[in-house]
Image (cartoon, helix red, strand yellow):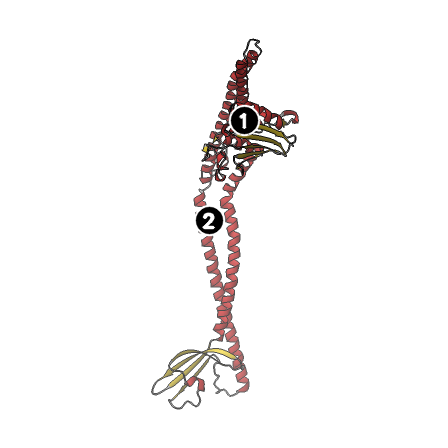
């Protein structure tokens, strides 16, 4: 196994080394710049003074001529005898001042003026600080350029360090993404060291293993439920069919057998829909066949008529145009059974109109209706309306989940003239 420091230690060490290296570089650069600038200023000053001295000697050939230093000018006088002192200096009290004066070359230059005054003497010392000012400007320029250069360098080093430090996390993300695309679980822990990333990989392995086991158990349960429930339903359906063929059955018994037959068909359709939702898989009809929605509507209306019973309710089915849905007939039947069954169940008088066409099925009733604020909440699991209107509980929640699975849209809305309208919109067949 490859050895790596823990991620936290790597980050701490990387930042410590980065700070140490950057500080050392900046300190070395500052010392170098200061030494270079000081050396440059000293050389410039010496060369200038030497030129001035040569020029002075050309003009004053006497060996006794005294060369006045251009950097320093000193005057000392008695109080009241200041004729030789510049007028601007005489107003200063004792102290040190920043002034500007005209130099030998006739240009304004910065100076320091030191003034001393007592009862016996007034002394003035002017020192040329233009060289120092020039050095300060150069130092600031060099420092600004250095800060910019170090900022760029820090950015580049930061990118490099972050890539090195975060490389295990990026590798883990790539492996998880690849595993997600392939759909095949793969153990991740073996690819990483025993650090924080390795611990995260181990946790993901544990979660993936438990999730895979859960999916396998769910598939086995779905297969068992499908088999165990379909078998008794098939027995009930075949027995009911045989009983209906008996010649000595009364009309009342025959109607009861038809009700049992409808209940068996509804149970089979509901089992199919619930298994589809459990697997979250589309079970499209084979050979490109589609479901005739109008035919399913007629079957559902016939199956749900017992909810109307002897109530003064008129049921109308209007087929405006053919409508096909790319889905199993059992799924379409379960979705429509909830909408139509609720309309039959809660309408005490009036009419229920089921309209098929234009890509949708609309169920209108004259029942107690729903409140607008309850329209969307009724599709949530276990939620019922504040009025005795469209059911709630699990039925409408199952309809919403089927619509999400197949890309349909379902909605409830109150009718202006009373009652409610349920609409189920299908996608066009592909």
Relative image position of residue 183 (x, y in whole percent) = 55, 32
Where is residue 260 drawn, in percent x and y?
A: 52, 18
Would residue 325 be visible to someone looking at this image? no
Q: Which mark is residue 273?
A: 1
The answer to whether the residue labelled 1 contacts the one labelled 2, judged by CB atoms less than 8 Å apart, is no
**Mark seen at residue 14:** 2
Q: Position of residue 101 (x, y in %)?
A: 48, 81
- Alpha carbon separation for disc pair 1 and 2: 57 Å
Q: Is residue 28 visible?
A: yes
- Quadrant (top left/top right/bottom left/bottom right) for the C terminus: top right
Q: Position of residue 9 (x, y in %)?
A: 43, 45
Residue in front for this viewpoint, 4 or 345 = 345
Relative to 34, is 408 above or below?
above
The secondary structure type at the circle numbered 2 is helix
Q: Earlier in the sequence, mark 1 or mark 2?
A: 2
- Label 1, secondary structure: give it: helix
């Amino acid at each position: 196994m490859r050895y790596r420091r823990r991620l936290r230690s790597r980050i701490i060490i990387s930042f410590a080394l980065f700070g140490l290296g950057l500080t050392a570089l900046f300190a070395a650069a500052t010392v170098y710049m200061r030494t270079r600038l000081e050396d440059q200023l000293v050389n410039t000053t010496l060369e200038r003074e030497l030129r001035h001295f040569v020029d002075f000697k050309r003009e004053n050939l006497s060996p006794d001529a005294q060369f006045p230093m251009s950097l320093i000018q000193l005057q000392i006088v008695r109080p009241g005898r200041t004729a030789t002192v510049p007028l601007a200096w005489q107003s200063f009290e004792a102290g040190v001042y920043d002034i500007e004066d005209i130099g030998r070359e006739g240009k304004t230059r910065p100076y320091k003026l030191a003034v001393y005054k007592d009862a016996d003497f007034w002394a003035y010392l002017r020192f040329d600080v233009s060289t120092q000012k020039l050095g300060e400007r150069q130092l600031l320029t060099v420092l600004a350029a250095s800060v910019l250069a170090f900022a760029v360098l820090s950015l580049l080093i930061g990118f490099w360090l972050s890539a090195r430090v975060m490389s295990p996390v990026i590798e883990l993300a790539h492996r998880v993404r690849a595993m997600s695309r392939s759909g095949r679980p793969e153990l991740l822990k073996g690819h990483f060291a025993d650090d924080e990333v390795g611990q995260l990989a181990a946790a993901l392995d544990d979660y993936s293993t438990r999730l895979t086991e859960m999916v396998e158990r769910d598939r086995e349960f779905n297969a068992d439920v499908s088999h165990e429930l379909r078998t008794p339903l098939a027995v009930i359906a075949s027995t009911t069919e045989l009983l209906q063929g008996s010649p000595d059955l009364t009309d009342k018994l025959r109607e009861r057998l038809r009700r049992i037959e409808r209940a068996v068909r509804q149970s089979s359709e509901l089992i199919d829909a619930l298994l589809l939702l459990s697997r979250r898989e589309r079970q499209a009809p084979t050979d490109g066949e589609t479901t005739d929605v109008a035919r399913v509507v007629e079957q559902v209306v016939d199956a749900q008529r017992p909810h109307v019973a002897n109530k003064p309710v008129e049921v109308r089915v209007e087929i405006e145009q053919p409508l096909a849905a790319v889905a199993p007939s059992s799924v379409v039947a379960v979705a429509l059974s909830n909408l139509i069954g609720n309309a039959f169940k809660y309408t005490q008088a009036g009419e229920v109109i089921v309209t098929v066409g234009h890509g949708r099925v609309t169920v209108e009733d004259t029942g107690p209706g729903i409140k607008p604020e309850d329209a969307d909440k009724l599709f949530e699991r276990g939620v019922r309306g504040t009025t005795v209107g469209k059911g709630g509980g699990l039925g409408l929640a199952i309809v919403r989940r089927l619509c999400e699975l197949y890309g349909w849209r379902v909605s409830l809305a109150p009718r202006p003239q009373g009652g409610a309208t349920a609409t189920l919109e299908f996608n066009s067949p592909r």
